[in-house]
């Protein structure tokens, strides 16, 4: 069994610029149960449609395993991670999270945050996964993680 807090080293992080709705996104994001993402509207895009935000895909040997998404709100980075069901619990999500953190830190953001939809079929599991990675529930219900080192860190 793979340690879920470690990340595989054979993955490739590819920025999609601009990003389009395609078959791989439809299979990984669009096929997720309703309520999984607060961005369910994405699955309404047709093939080849330009989609909002900054997108990266994760590949291994040409196969798409996951996506990372980031958007900016008041200088903080809202993020989304989507890992194909066949590649969950193998460290791929941890890899995506670390890369999104690198992207956000490189842009000078102070926080990463994620909003787990109350309709998410595994809201408690996703929340717990993020909390294990130093995210804290904030007053508005989002999960936040500081990118700024604390004094003494």
Image (cartoon, helix red, strand yellow):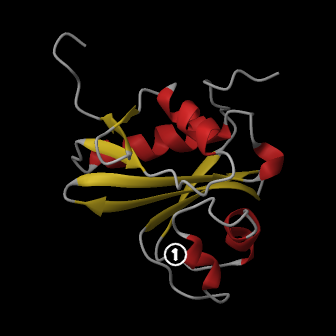
- The quarter of the rendered structure image containing the N terminus is top right
Q: Is residue 39 above or below residue 65?
A: below
| Among the 4 quarters of the image, the one containing residue 78 | bottom left
Q: Callout 1: few (<14), some (14-19), or many (20+) C-alpha neighbours within 10 Å?
A: some
Residue at point 35% right, 44% down?
112
Residue at point 67% right, 45% down?
122
Give the image location of residue 137, x and y in percent.
Answer: 38, 36
Residue 131 left/right relative to 147: right
| Among the 4 quarters of the image, the one containing residue 145 | top left
Considering every residue shown, the one lying at the far top of the view is: 152
Q: Nearer the viewer, residue 8 or 125?
A: 125
Q: Nearer the viewer, residue 107 or 113?
A: 113
Residue at point 62% right, 24% down?
6
Q: Is residue 113 above or below residue 68?
A: above
Secondary structure of the residue carrying numbered label 1? loop
| Among the 4 quarters of the image, the one containing residue 88 | top right
Q: Which residue is mark 1?
A: 19
Residue at point 64% right, 78% down?
43
């Amino acid at each position: 069994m793979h340690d879920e807090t470690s990340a595989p080293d054979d993955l490739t992080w590819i920025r999609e610029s601009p990003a389009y709705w395609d078959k791989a996104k439809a299979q990984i994001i669009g096929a997720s149960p309703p309520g999984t993402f607060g961005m369910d509207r994405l699955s309404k895009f047709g093939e080849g449609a330009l989609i909002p935000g900054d997108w990266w895909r994760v590949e291994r040997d040409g196969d798409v395993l996951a996506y990372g998404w980031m958007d900016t709100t008041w200088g903080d980075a809202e993020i989304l991670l989507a890992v194909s069901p066949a590649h969950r619990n193998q460290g791929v999500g941890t890899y995506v999270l670390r890369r999104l953190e690198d992207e956000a830190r490189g842009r000078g953001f102070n926080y990463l945050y994620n909003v787990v939809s109350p309709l998410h079929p595994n809201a408690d599991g996703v929340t717990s996964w993020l909390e294990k990675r130093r995210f804290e529930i904030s007053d508005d219900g989002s999960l936040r993680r500081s990118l700024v080192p604390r004094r003494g860190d």
